Image (cartoon, rainbow, N blue to C red):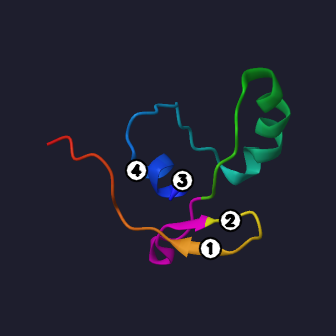
Amino acid sequence: SAAELALGGGEDYELLICLDSGDLEAARSIAVEVGLTVVGLILDASSGVLLEDASGGGKALTSEGWEHF
């Protein structure tokens, strides 16, 4: 699927940062100026990794992609 290719294809590179949730609103106000996009939330590890679709539904993701070593 397009989502699998985008998440595991390995040919696109972006800078990823993590912010405290308390800084999210400030980051959103800066985002327009510097091109930031909020892509997700970090939750308790027992939640696993979920991909949320436009309707709010979630799909569990498995570890895939390029193996460097």
The residue located at (70%, 39%) in the rendering is 37
Q: Secondary structure at mark 1?
A: strand
* Sequence order check, earlier mark of 2 and 1: 2
Between marks 2 and 1, how big is the CA–CA gap?
6 Å
49 in the magenta segment: yes
Q: Nearer the viewer, mark 1 or mark 4?
A: 4
Element at label 2: loop
The kind of residue on which mark 3 rests is Ala
Structural distance between the alpha carbons of marks 2 and 3: 13 Å
Amino acid at the residue labelled 4: Gly
Q: In the visual, does 69 lie left or right of 33?
A: left
Amino acid on which the number 1 mark rests in the picture: Gly
Identify the residue under disc 4.
8
Q: Which residue is mark 2?
A: 53
Residue marked by disc 3: 2
> CA separation, marks 1 and 4?
18 Å
Q: Which residue is disc 1 drawn over?
A: 58
